[in-house]
Image: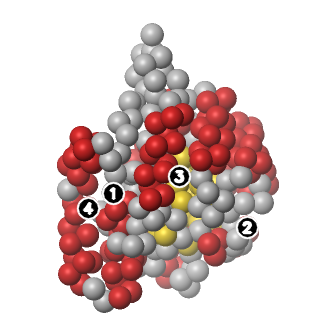
């Protein structure tokens, strides 16, 4: 099932109305803009502000996104939560709503050892037949997952269902360690916003989950195809462009090519 889960899956930036509701119209514009730039799928995850959404809003975001996407464009939905029950409920809903795969961070409000963490992910694998991207998210929780933990998940739940999004530093050496420990079978998405895509690809990564502002530079018509064709000039130009992604995002929004996504305020009225 993971065979088709590869390539560029940008994480959506959830837009909100002045009243703080998900802005479905602007969301649809964002999704269509990404599709026009050749992405393989989209992701609803941390950058989508899922931790600031109620469970009902998370379900709505999943359903709305899937309704806009063509059938052949993938959808990865983050279902990580602070309890196994909530995460499993979100996993079942995303599966029924037409997700291609799930992704999950560990709980971030409590510290759990890898034994408890294994049980958490085991519950998710039991709640869905879909592949699950195990997101390290150590930038949020401060505790990176070990390579041994990844290997154990693959051994128990199989290569066809387990994917990874490691984010702990140093990323490159960790990717190489995971590749070597699994005989190259681990399916990895890099999560540096595309900045480490070229190095990660060399270390065995099968895809990337950047923000929504850079798909023109790293979609299959960009870096991946340039590398396959040997077009070094195009490859280098698009790779350099990633370093200025934040500025490019502002330029694109100013030109109206990407809808302005109003973020959810910390203190709602």
Q: Is residue 154 visible?
A: no
Give the residue pinned by disc 2: 157
Labels 4 & 1 near each other (Cβ < 8 A): yes
Q: Identify residue for label 3.
A: 43
CA neighbours of label 4 inside 10 A, class few (<14), some (14 to 19), many (20+):
many
User: At which x and y percent is residue 54?
Assistant: 60, 27
SS at badge 2: helix
Q: Label 1 to label 3, Cα distance in Å?
A: 14 Å
Q: How many marks?
A: 4
Determine which residue is flagged by label 1: 214
- 185 or 69, which is in the foreground? 69
Question: 49 or 153: nearer the eye?
Answer: 49
> In the rendered structure, are the residues bearing label 3 and label 4 in contact, judged by CB atoms less than 8 Å apart?
no
Quarter of the figure that contains the N terminus: bottom right
Q: CA distance from mark 2 to mark 4?
A: 35 Å
Check disc 3: other Cα within 10 Å, few if <14, some if 14-19, many if 20+.
many
Q: Secondary structure at mark 4?
A: helix
Asked if one can make out residue 159 in the rendered structure from this viewpoint, the answer is: yes
Image mark for residue 149 = none
The residue sitting at 52% across, 65% down in the picture is 40
The quarter holding residue 131 reads bottom right
How many neighbours does mark 1 have within 10 angstroms: few (below 14), some (14-19), or many (20 or more)? many
Give SS at disc 1. loop
Q: Is residue 249 left or right of residue 48?
A: left
């Amino acid at each position: 099932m993971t065979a088709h889960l590869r390539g560029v899956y940008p994480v959506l930036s959830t837009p909100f109305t002045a009243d703080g509701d998900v802005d479905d119209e602007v969301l649809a514009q964002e999704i269509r803009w990404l599709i026009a730039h050749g992405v393989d799928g989209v992701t609803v995850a941390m950058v989508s502000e899922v931790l600031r959404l109620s469970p009902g809003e998370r379900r709505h975001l999943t359903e709305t996104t899937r309704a806009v996407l063509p059938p052949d464009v993938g959808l990865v939905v983050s279902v990580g939560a602070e309890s196994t029950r909530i995460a499993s409920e979100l996993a079942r809903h995303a599966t029924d709503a037409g997700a291609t795969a799930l992704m999950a961070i560990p709980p971030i409000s409590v510290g759990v050892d890898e034994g408890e963490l294994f049980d958490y992910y085991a519950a998710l694998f039991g709640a869905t037949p879909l592949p699950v991207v195990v997101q390290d998210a150590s930038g949020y929780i401060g505790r990176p997952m070990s390579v041994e933990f990844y290997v154990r998940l693959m051994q128990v739940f199989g290569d066809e269902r387990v994917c990874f999004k490691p984010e702990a530093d140093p990323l490159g050496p960790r990717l190489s360690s995971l590749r070597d420990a699994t005989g190259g079978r681990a399916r990895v998405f890099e999560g540096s916003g595309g900045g480490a895509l070229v190095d990660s690809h060399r270390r065995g990564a099968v895809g990337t989950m950047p923000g929504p502002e850079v798909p023109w530079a790293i979609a299959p018509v960009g870096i991946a195809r340039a590398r396959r064709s040997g077009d070094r000039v195009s490859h280098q130009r698009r790779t350099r462009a990633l370093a200025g992604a934040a500025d490019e995002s502002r330029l694109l929004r100013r030109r109206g090519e990407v809808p302005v996504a109003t973020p959810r305020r910390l203190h709602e009225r």
